[in-house]
Amino acid sequence: MTSPTSEPWSVEVVQRGGSGSVNYHEPSGTISFYWEFGGGDAIAMISIADLGSGAVDIRGTVKRRRQILERVAKDVVRQKAPTCRADTDDGSGYIYIR
């Protein structure tokens, strides 16, 4: 996906049984997040704890954290759970798909 003021980007959801990865791609690199099916009112949880830790190499990741998380959350809902919503909880380090 692209917008008039940004580089192209995409989100890929990979499933391996009851978990997998969510891969956020930009021309400058890729960030992989771990996800697993949830319980209670969360159908899935995406771990975001490592974003901004220096373990990823997309330029400006720390400054653009909120933008990247919003893109990931919205695109996962669009692709896999269009009747759900995404809630980002920085305290727990997860995006919850409900």
Image (cartoon, rainbow, N blue to C red):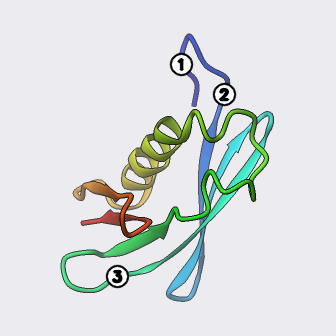
Q: Alpha carbon of mark 1 to alpha carbon of mark 2: how far?
A: 7 Å
User: Which residue matches tag 2?
Assistant: 8
Identify the residue at image location x=69%, y=53%.
31
Q: In which quarter of the image is the N terminus?
A: top right
Above or below residue 37? Residue 96 is above
Q: Which residue extends farthest left?
A: 41
User: Which residue matches tag 1?
Assistant: 3
Above or below residue 86? Residue 19 is below
Q: Which residue extends farthest top?
A: 4
Identify the residue at image location x=74%, y=49%.
30
Element at label 1: loop
Residue 38: mark: 3
Above or below residue 5? Residue 80 is below
The amino acid on which the numbered mark 3 sits, given as a three-letter code, is: Gly
Nearer-N-terminus badge (1/3): 1
Identify the residue at image location x=40%, y=72%.
45
Above or below residue 16? Residue 85 is above
Q: Is residue 97 left or right of residue 71?
A: left
Instruction: Give the percent coordinates (x, y) of residue 43.
Output: 30, 75
Residue 61: mark: none
Instruction: Give the percent coordinates (x, y) of residue 12.
Output: 61, 55
Q: Quadrant of residue 90?
A: bottom left
